[in-house]
Amino acid sequence: MTPPISARAQTTLPAVAVALVLLTLVTALGLGLADSAIASAERTPDERRVASATAERLVAADGPVADRANVLNGSRVDTFDGPALRNETPATAGYAVEVTVGSDVVAATGDAADGTTIRRLVLVARTDTRAIEPESRQVTLPRRATSATVTFSPGNGAAVRTMRVNEQVRLHNDSGLRGAYEVELTPYRTTRIEFQTPGRIERGAVEISYETPRTTKRTLSVTVDV
Amino acid sequence: MSRAQLPLSLVEVALGATLILGVALGFTLATPVPDTRGPQLTAYAEDTATVLQTDPARHNGTSRLREVVTSQRAFDRESGSLERRVERILPANILFRVRTPYGSVGTAVPRRTTTGTATVSTGAGTVRIEVWYA
């Protein structure tokens, strides 16, 4: 009843060959799968690290575009660009980085559309300059005003002899004030400016231009792609 | 007997394939996913704290954050405006809770949620800001 041994072995040989081929294929497939899984897990930490380091650098108080911590200087943000970003943050070498403030792309060093993004909350500070031409002897400037330039051009009208800021004499000239003067203001309280003149202050004789900081809340996003 | 010989190696290859694919699947599924939400939330909390610290106080005090921890009265008076301010600073998809020695403002912190926290020490007490995704 026992079949000859040689007959048994012959029938399995092609099957073993097929099995070996199949197993090799499956092994290669599995290795490829595992490799790509590990590669994708290792790729993002690098991007994330570069993105958070760049964002940290940009919002730091001594950063290239910051006035204080988390407060960016609007005009410096406007002039900031890709090469400046490369210079200021050496960590971005070899990566495509895109920096946006709000919805505007501020600086880009390549296409980083599908990269890793870190967002920071910042205030963008810009300075507004306003000018007023007082027609009375008293003017009140808002509390936020940081510095003012007062220009006296009396023409034929009465000269202004004294200017008081918050009841303290700042400028005085018996023969009349003339020209432009820089006046530092305290940002903690409203400023009252008084002019002393024998006559009336005519329109255009005195011009006060003052600067008020204006901050807007924005989101700074740094996207990094390999 | 002679019938059973051929499928045996095919059964073996099926078992081998299952084993190898199982290991590969393990790599795909069990590779740790980096925690991307935590650091971002911590950054949001830290930024909120920094902005509040540099905000000028509404009445007297050095900063808005210092002002709310001065006294119970100051907290009661300022808590509404503090809540509005934090709401404006944070993006719309973020909820927050600000804890001070005199009380808290914001939404109650849910359990089992990744949150980011920032703690600020002032002369009058500690303020803790906690944020999480809505």
Image (tube, rainbow, N blue to C red):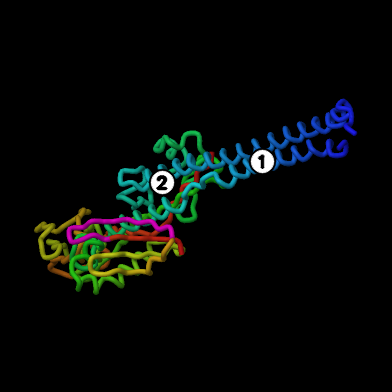
Residue A207 is at least partly visible in this image: no
A52 vs A125, nearest the viewer: A52
Q: Is residue A52 left or right of residue B61?
A: right
Which image quarter: residue B2?
A: top right
Residue found 14% across the figure and 64% down from its top? A166
The answer to whether tags 2 and 1 share a subunit is no
As shown in the figure, which amino acid type bears the numbered disc 2?
Ala
Rendering coords of residue A76 (x, y %): 38, 47
**Magenta residues (range):** B113-127
Disc assigned to residue A134:
none
Q: Residues within 10 Å of mark 1 (few under 14, many from 20)?
A: some
Q: Which residue is mark 2?
A: A55
| Amino acid carrying mark 1 in the image | Leu
Q: Residues within 10 Å of mark 2 (few under 14, many from 20)?
A: many
In the picture, residue A214 is in which quadrant? bottom left
Question: In the picture, residue B131 is in which quadrant?
Answer: bottom left
Relative to A107, is B122 above or below? below
Horizontal side of residue A197 vs A140, given as left or right: left
Q: Secondary structure of the magenta portion, mostly?
A: strand
Front in this rendered view, residue B25 or A202: B25
Pointer 2 chain = A
Which dot, 2 or 1, sits closer to the camera? 1
Q: Position of residue B94 (x, y in %)?
A: 43, 62
Q: Is residue B109 visible to us here?
A: yes
Could you tell me residue A140's position as x and y percent?
22, 68
> SS of the residue at dot 1?
helix
In this figure, which residue is indicated by the disc labeled 1? B19
